[in-house]
Amino acid sequence: MRRGDFSVEVIPVNADNIREIDSGHVLARPGAVYAIRLRNLGPLRAVTAIEIDGRRITGGGLVLDAYSVVTLERPVDGSDAGRFTVVAEGDEKVFGPDGGRDNSELGLIEASFKRELPRGSTQTYAIPELAWSRMNRITELPVEFFGLREPAPQSTDASIERAAGTGLTGHSDQRFVPITLGALETEATVITLRLVIGTEEALGGARPLPADRDASVPARPAARP
């Protein structure tokens, strides 16, 4: 999904069955490992803040150089270097006793971007150091990673099977180093997608990704037992 100088794409790591549709939903199957591809198509450096399932996973911010592409494999902060993995709603080991049903932001991937202004005061952010990765163990995202939110509008799209969120599996060698930038613009460019479990039929055929859409938040599928 692109908006202005920035774009966000959920890309598969261990399978080809991930696809964005016009509504802003990203269809995937349980267990799919994914990464988030971020593009800065403008002439200025920028900082992005990313939230998954209502929790920030980029710490103080992730830097994108001008005309650059960054692929984020794992949360920036924390000791767990597991990779982003699709988990269907109802998994109590990952989402806690409610299985994620009470989290209105389950599945949301929201990225906000702010460009760097001419130098004045400075602040330190993170930038990826290494992009190669390997899979060698299974871990789960702590329950504390997920927050409880107010009810959200619910989707009735026939291509969506149920809600989904994100856990961590395997291992990523991606590391981050600090970098100092100047002040950032006040208004952010925001791009929002929602990860869901898509039906086998919907994921069976290829369709082009939409280049743009309105700024509305993709609806959450109704909670299931």
Image: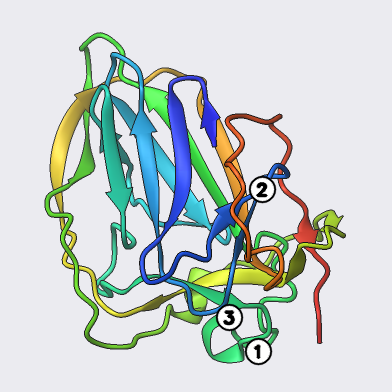
Q: Secondary structure at mark 3?
A: helix
Residue indicated by mark 3: 95
Amino acid on which the number 1 mark rests in the picture: Pro
98 vs 189, left or right, is right
Q: Residue at x 50, y 20 (%)?
A: 4
Q: Residues within 10 Å of mark 2 (few under 14, many from 20)?
A: some
- Give the distance between the C-alpha atoms of the residues marked 1 and 2, in whole angstroms: 31 Å
Q: Secondary structure at mark 1?
A: loop
Residue 59 x/y as whole percent: 34, 51
Residue 16's disc number: none
Please determine whether, in this image, residue 71 is positioned above or below residue 113: below
Extreme residue toward the top, this view:
118
110 vs 200, left or right, is left
191 vs 153, left or right, is left
Indicate the quadrant containing the N terminus: top left, top right, bottom left or bottom right: top right
Residue indicated by mark 1: 97
